[in-house]
Image (cartoon, rainbow, N blue to C red):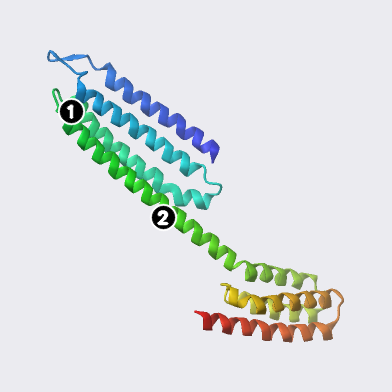
Amino acid sequence: MKKTFKFYVIIWVICLLLFNVIAFVIPNEIAGISKFDGAFWVGYIFITLAFIGQLICAYIAFKAENLKKLFYNIPLISISYIGLVAMLVVGGLTMAIPHFPNWIGIIVCLLVLGFTAISVIKATAVAEIVSKIDNKIAAETAFIKAITVDAQNLISRANAPMLKEQCKKIYEALRYSDPMSNVALADVEQRIKEEFDALTDAVIADDLDATESSVKELTTLIAERNNKCKALK
């Protein structure tokens, strides 16, 4: 994503250069009136600030460590881009209109800049909240996801068909279990983990009796966990 940001910077620099060329290449005197008055510099400064702000927003978005967080940060780019376009229009009019009152230009440009800044802050806050929720969900579903994968792998490690059938029962039971965890489930989940370790040892040892016993106990524990999940909702 850092490489992508480098390409973005190149485009940003080109756009900034184009703005400056257009702003200064127009003749200094238009109809005998100097265009480099106070209103011109008001518009120019605010547009430049909008360009800088947009680049900062893009940097924050592209520095995300994964694609999911980049997706959450896309509003930063789009909102700052819309704000830049709005500032180009408002600031451009301020620069182009001769004898345009400075105070009007400052107020209007400040309004656009302020609205954009507020929108960007809101988008940043929302992205942070969603990211925290995702991390929380990932942590709360880690137990079932991990042990389900282990159960699936255990099927392939079973040598006898009867052992495979027993392992499939546990895999299916875990696969359709409630994925959300809770501190109140810590005890039963610990017992499930311990019993699953016993099942793994039994399967590796080709011990059908021990496997059937562990499967029966695990089935009971998984059902107990699912019932507690329902009660906690």
Circle 1: residue type:
Asn
Position of residue 71 measured from the top left corner of the image (x, y, whole percent): 47, 51
Question: Which residue is labeled 2 in the image?
Answer: 126
Q: Is residue 40 above or below residue 54?
A: above
For the residue pair 221 and 30, the one nearer the viewer reads as 221
Q: Secondary structure at mark 2?
A: helix
Q: In this rendered view, identify the residue nearer to me: 68 or 142.
A: 142
Q: Establish if 164 lies above or below 47.
A: below
Look at the picture and state if 128 lies above or below 200: above
Indicate the position of residue 38 as horizontal and vertical percent values.
20, 22
Amino acid under label 2?
Val
The answer to whether residue 213 shows anywhere in this view is: yes
C-alpha separation, residue under disc 2 versus residue under disc 1: 36 Å
Determine the residue positioned at 73% across, 85% down.
217
Observer able to see residue 177:
no
Q: Name the residue at 20% across, 29% down.
A: 94
Q: Secondary structure at mark 1?
A: helix
Q: Nearer the viewer, residue 59 or 171?
A: 59
Q: Is residue 216 left or right of residue 175?
A: right
Question: Is 148 placed left or right of 116 in the picture?
Answer: right
Kindly identify which residue carries mark 1.
102
Identify which residue is drawn at 40% across, 43% down: 77
